[in-house]
Image (cartoon, rainbow, N blue to C red):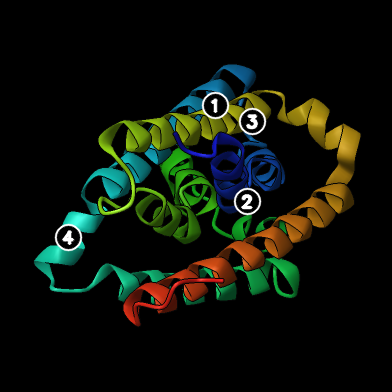
Amino acid sequence: MIDILAVFISFFAVIDPIGTIPVFIAVTDQYDKKTKRRIALLATIVSAGILIFFLVVGELLLKALSIPLPAFQISGGIVLFLFALTMIFGDSKIDGEIKMLEDDHRDTAIFPLAVPSIASPGAMLAAVLLTKNTVFTVWEQVQTALVMLSVLLVAYILMLLAGGVNRLIGSSGARVISRVMGLILSAIATTNILAGLSEYFNVVPV
C-alpha cells in the first residue's frame, strides 16, 4: 500500500494545479466559455496521456538504454531540484509560460497548457520515480496512477473555475503558492537524490 498522501503531495507539487490557473486565464482570454471548457478538457487528457506513458514505459526505456534506475533517480532528482529553484527564485509559471501563447485553441491546449504547464518535466520524472518496478507492485503502481489522475482532475476543475479562483487569490497569491510548491519540490528532489545514492552504493539510508 502506497502512502497516498505523500504521493498526492508529490504530484501536486510538480503538476502545480494552482500555478496553472493564471496560465490558463492568460492563454484562453480571447475564447468564449464553451471553448475554454474544451481547452481545459483537452489539456487534461493530453497531460494524462503523457504522464501515463512515462509511468508505464519510462523504466522500460531506461533499461533499453542500459541506464540504471539509481542513476536516473539521481539525475532526475537534480533536474527536479533545479526545476524547484526556478519556481522559488526564477520565473514562476505565471511569468514564464504565458509567453508561449498559440492562436488555435487545440494548439493552446497542448502547448503551453498540457506541456510544459501541467505535464511538466518534473511531473514526467516523478511518474517514473514513484513507480519503480523493483520497489512497487503492479497494484501499487496502479494506485499511484490513480492518485496522479486525481491531481489532474483537480487541475481540470480549477481550470473550469479559473475565473473565480483568480479573483480570489489574485496573481500575487498564485505566485506565493507556486513558490511554496517549489520549496516542497526541492525537498522531494533532495530525497530522490539521497535515495538514488544510497541504492547505487548499496548504503542503507538513515
Name the amino acid, label 1.
Answer: Leu
Q: Say what secondary structure mark 2 lies in.
A: helix
Q: Tell which tag, 1 or 3, sits nearer the viewer.
A: 1
Residue at numbered disc 4: 61
Which mark, residue 153?
1
Which residue does the image show at 72% across and 45% down from the upper left?
22
Q: Say what secondary structure mark 3 lies in.
A: helix
Q: Are marks 4 and 2 in contact (CB under 8 Å)?
A: no
Q: Are marks 1 and 3 in contact (CB under 8 Å)?
A: no
Q: Say what secondary structure mark 1 lies in.
A: helix
- How far apart, in angstroms, are the residues tagged by discs 4 and 2? 25 Å
* Residue 138 on image: x %, y %: 26, 36
Residue 202 makes an appearance in the image: yes
Which residue does the image show at 62% across and 23% down from the upper left?
32
Towards the viewer: 159 or 52: 52
Q: Quadrant of the C terminus?
A: bottom right
Q: Quadrant of the N terminus?
A: top left
Name the amino acid, label 4.
Answer: Leu
Towards the viewer: 35 or 41: 41
* Residue 104 on image: x %, y %: 44, 39
Q: Quadrant of residue 6?
A: top right
Q: Are marks 1 and 2 in contact (CB under 8 Å)?
A: no
- How far apart, in angstroms, are the residues tagged by discs 3 and 2? 17 Å
